[in-house]
């Protein structure tokens, strides 16, 4: 167990404590962490012409991305906050943008139910009839551009996420998890629920319909990448390989709402009072229910050393969280540890907000919170397995 000194600069903290736990040395991402940054970006959010711009890739100034996803992913702003913020915009832009918010919520619902099984084919297993020589990938301008932007900034737009997932998930489907993991490591908004569902959807594992990535998409959305590519006249993705087989997968999941989504009301041990608020990477914002309710209690955040050593995310992601924690430390008494969460929390009486992810469920079973608050959700919990976004949306009840 190690207590971090947040007065040190981020480079020093990375070099002293995270060097062996990350996949790179020191890279600051495109977006800065912190509640004040998140609030400012939400306040300045402009989705005018989003319906027309949302799939743009290059030039960058024509992109329609809101760049809010890292702040949503870490609970600095909620999907409810963003939903309400866009109410005054034109219907077409607002509806398309809100569809993306619902997709994010759908991914969270699905992950709450399937958890670690998200790395397996969901409803269908799709294969294609042609694999690509990976050596050619190094010379493809579109793919190298995506990788460079991802590694340098920690952010790529949704269109290029789909290109990358389709390219490596379907042309090289036997090891798609390796490439999905690479994307997860570097994305500032990297989450297993959103990232993996995106890959599953692209590969047809969720719907039985694939998203085929080929040269024409690059020409339409980022023509300059094709024009400057050495493979322009010998493109290995000139056409999309044929689908060879689609096999249905039968699923059986525990659909108990309490098990999957946690408490729907505040749960208290009436014989005890919490001494700390424990915040997780899912909920770092000032509006975290436990943090907000117990405004006078000291706060604990834990970098799970074993987990970090296993997944080895980019330093960009650690820096984003450090920036957020340092701002919180200016407002609240905060202790930040690196170590085993169970060992650190075992003798402490804690209040916490439920996080519908496997790691939190495991920890909270071993360390029972004195007070546990429900997670903030755009859509109320479900008691069915959502085989598709459309089937889920028909039954979804907004929590507004």
Image (cartoon, rainbow, N blue to C red):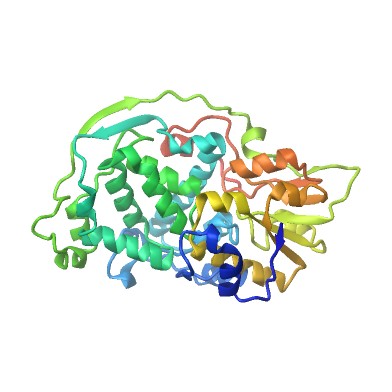
Q: Nearer the viewer, residue 163 or 84?
A: 163
Measuring from the top left, give residue 75's x and y in whole percent. 60, 57
Q: Residue at x 57, y 48 (%)?
A: 378
In the picture as drawn, the residue positioned furthest to the right comes out as: 271
Decide if residue 365 is in sight here.
yes
Question: Residue 318 is drawn in which quadrant?
Answer: bottom right
Give me the residue at 89% from left, 46% from top.
272
**Of 345 and 167, which appears nearest the observer?**
345
Residue 222 is situated, as x and y percent measured from the top left of the image, at 23, 63
Q: Residue at x 17, y 54 (%)?
A: 216
Q: Say whether residue 33 is left or right of residue 118.
A: right
Q: Is residue 56 visible?
A: no
Q: Is residue 194 left or right of residue 369?
A: left
Q: Eyeballing the image, is 394 above or below 137?
A: above
| Left or right: where 10 falls relative to 2 | left
Answer above or below: position of 69 versus 253.
below
Residue 224 location in percent, x, y? 19, 68
- Give coordinates of residue 383: x percent, y percent: 58, 30
Seen in the picture, residue 68 relative to 116 is either above or below; the reply is: below
Furthest-left residue in this view: 233
Residue at 76% in and 43% down: 367
């Amino acid at each position: 167990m190690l207590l971090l000194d947040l007065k040190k600069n981020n480079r020093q903290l990375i070099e002293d404590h995270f060097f062996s736990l990350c996949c790179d040395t020191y890279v600051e991402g495109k977006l800065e962490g912190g509640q004040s940054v998140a609030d400012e970006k939400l306040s300045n959010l402009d989705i005018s012409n989003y319906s027309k711009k949302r799939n743009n890739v290059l030039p960058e100034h024509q992109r329609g991305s809101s760049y809010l996803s890292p702040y949503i992913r870490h609970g600095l702003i909620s999907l409810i906050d963003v939903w309400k913020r866009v109410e005054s915009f034109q219907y077409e832009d607002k509806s398309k943008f809100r569809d993306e918010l619902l997709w994010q919520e759908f991914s969270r619902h699905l992950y709450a139910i399937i958890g670690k099984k998200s790395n397996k084919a969901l409803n269908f297993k799709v294969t294609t009839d042609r694999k690509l020589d990976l050596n050619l990938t190094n010379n493809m301008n579109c793919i190298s551009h995506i990788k460079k932007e991802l590694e340098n900034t920690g952010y790529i737009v949704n269109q290029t996420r789909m290109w990358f997932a389709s390219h490596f998930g379907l042309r090289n489907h036997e090891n798609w998890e390796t490439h999905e993991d690479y994307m997860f490591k570097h994305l500032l908004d990297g989450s297993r629920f959103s990232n993996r569902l995106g890959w599953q959807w692209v590969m047809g594992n969720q719907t039985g319909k694939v998203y085929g990535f080929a040269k024409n998409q690059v020409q339409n959305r980022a023509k300059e990448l094709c024009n400057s590519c050495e493979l322009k006249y010998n493109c290995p993705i000139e056409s999309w390989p044929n689908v060879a087989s689609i096999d249905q997968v039968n699923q059986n999941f525990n659909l108990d709402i309490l098990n999957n989504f946690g408490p729907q009301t505040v749960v208290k041990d009436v014989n005890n009072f919490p001494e700390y608020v424990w915040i997780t990477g899912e909920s770092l914002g000032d509006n975290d229910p436990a943090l907000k309710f117990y405004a006078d209690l000291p706060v604990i955040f834990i970098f799970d050393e074993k987990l970090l050593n296993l997944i080895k995310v980019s330093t960009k992601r650690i820096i984003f969280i450090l920036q957020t924690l340092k701002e919180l430390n200016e407002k609240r008494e905060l202790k930040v540890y690196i170590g085993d969460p169970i060992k650190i929390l075992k003798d402490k009486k804690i209040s916490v907000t439920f996080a519908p992810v496997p790691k939190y469920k495991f920890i909270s079973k071993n360390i029972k919170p004195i007070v546990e608050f429900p997670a903030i959700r755009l859509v109320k919990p479900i008691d069915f397995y959502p085989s598709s976004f459309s089937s889920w949306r028909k039954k979804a009840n907004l929590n507004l």
